[in-house]
Image (tube, rainbow, N blue to C red):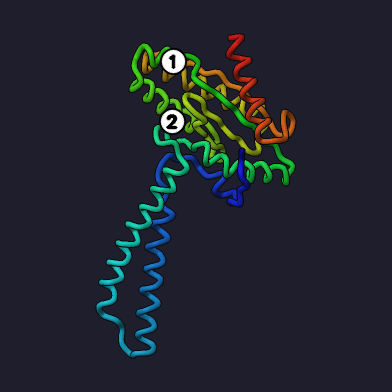
């Protein structure tokens, strides 16, 4: 189900801003600037005079590199993020989760995972329409991102289901996250005048499970157990 990952922990634990990154654009422009400086220096040293018209071409090349870099950043964003909520998608998780789990295993640390969904989401869609339902999901995803740690990953797992992946965190840490989310959700419900509730299930590596699929299954079962007895 999940492939291997060779990404660094900087990517794995990056801040989930929900905006398109700048790596492609910055890299493209930087390479053009370095090339322009190198060419001017070469011309001055070996030909005895600078390339007076070269800066113009360098500016044009930098603009083209910026445009190409923007397309790269945009495509990378769309490949990793859910288009509606701007959270990470399942494809991204399938790539980074194995490497992240290997990392905490190697350092003998814990990793906790929370699965949650909106209890009454179907009723919201039926009562207010799918457009309002989409707005609720966008608001919920923004709320989740605002109430997790910088290193945590928020993932839209599907429909109204989300996963929070918290490296170097135990169950107690995610329980605190759950409390913050529920408090913020109460304020959101009052603001929108729509009753929005969530059910959450938590699983921790290595106490609850040692494999990725088992962690997700354990958190999912925990969530539905709570939902069933609510």
Query: 203 or 214, which is in the foreground?
Result: 214
Residue 146 location (% of width, % of height)? 47, 32
Query: From this viewpoint, is residue 190 visible?
Result: no
Residue 216 location (% of width, % of height)? 63, 29
Residue 181 location (% of width, % of height)? 51, 24
The residue at the point 35 percent across, 84 percent down is 43
Residue located farthest toward the front when viewing the structure as drawn = 1
Q: Is residue 123 above or below residue 221?
A: above
Q: What element carries label 2?
A: helix
Residue located farthest toward the top when viewing the structure as drawn = 229
Q: Mark 2 points at which residue?
A: 142
2 or 1: mark nearer the eye:
1
Q: What element carries label 1?
A: helix
- The total number of labels drawn is 2
Please state if 82 lies on the left or on the right of 4 as rendered.
left
Q: Distance between the residues labelled 2 and 1?
A: 20 Å
Query: From this viewpoint, is residue 21 visible?
Result: yes
Please state if 214 lies on the left or on the right of 117 as rendered.
right
Residue 122 circle label: 1
Query: 125 or 148, which is in the foreground?
Result: 125
Neighbour class for label 2 at 10 Å: few (<14), some, many (≥20)? Answer: some
Residue 209 location (% of width, % of height)? 72, 31
Q: In the rendered structure, which disc, 2 or 1, sits on the residue that comes first in sequence? A: 1
Residue 186 circle label: none
Q: Is residue 208 above or below residue 51?
A: above
The residue at the point 41 percent across, 67 percent down is 31
């Amino acid at each position: 189900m999940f492939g291997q990952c060779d990404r660094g922990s900087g990517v794995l634990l990056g801040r989930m801003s929900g905006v398109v990154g700048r790596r492609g654009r910055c890299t493209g422009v930087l390479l053009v600037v370095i090339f322009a400086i190198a060419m001017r220096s070469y011309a001055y040293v070996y030909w005895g005079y600078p390339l007076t018209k070269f800066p113009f071409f360098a500016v044009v090349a930098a603009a083209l590199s910026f445009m190409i870099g923007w397309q790269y950043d945009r495509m990378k964003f769309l490949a990793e993020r859910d288009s509606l909520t701007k959270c990470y998608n399942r494809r991204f998780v399938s790539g980074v989760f194995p490497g992240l789990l290997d990392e905490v295993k190697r350092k003998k640390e814990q990793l906790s995972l929370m699965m949650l969904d909106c209890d009454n989401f179907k009723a919201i869609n039926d009562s207010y329409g799918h457009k309002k339902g989409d707005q609720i999901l966008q608001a919920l995803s923004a709320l989740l991102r605002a109430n997790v740690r910088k290193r945590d990953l928020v993932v839209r797992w599907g429909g109204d289901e989300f996963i929070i992946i918290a490296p170097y965190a135990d169950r107690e840490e995610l329980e605190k996250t759950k409390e913050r989310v529920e408090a913020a959700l109460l304020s959101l419900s009052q603001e929108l005048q729509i009753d929005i509730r969530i059910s959450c299930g938590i699983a921790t590596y290595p106490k609850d499970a040692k494999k990725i699929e088992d962690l997700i299954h354990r958190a999912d079962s925990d969530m539905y157990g709570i939902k069933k007895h609510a």
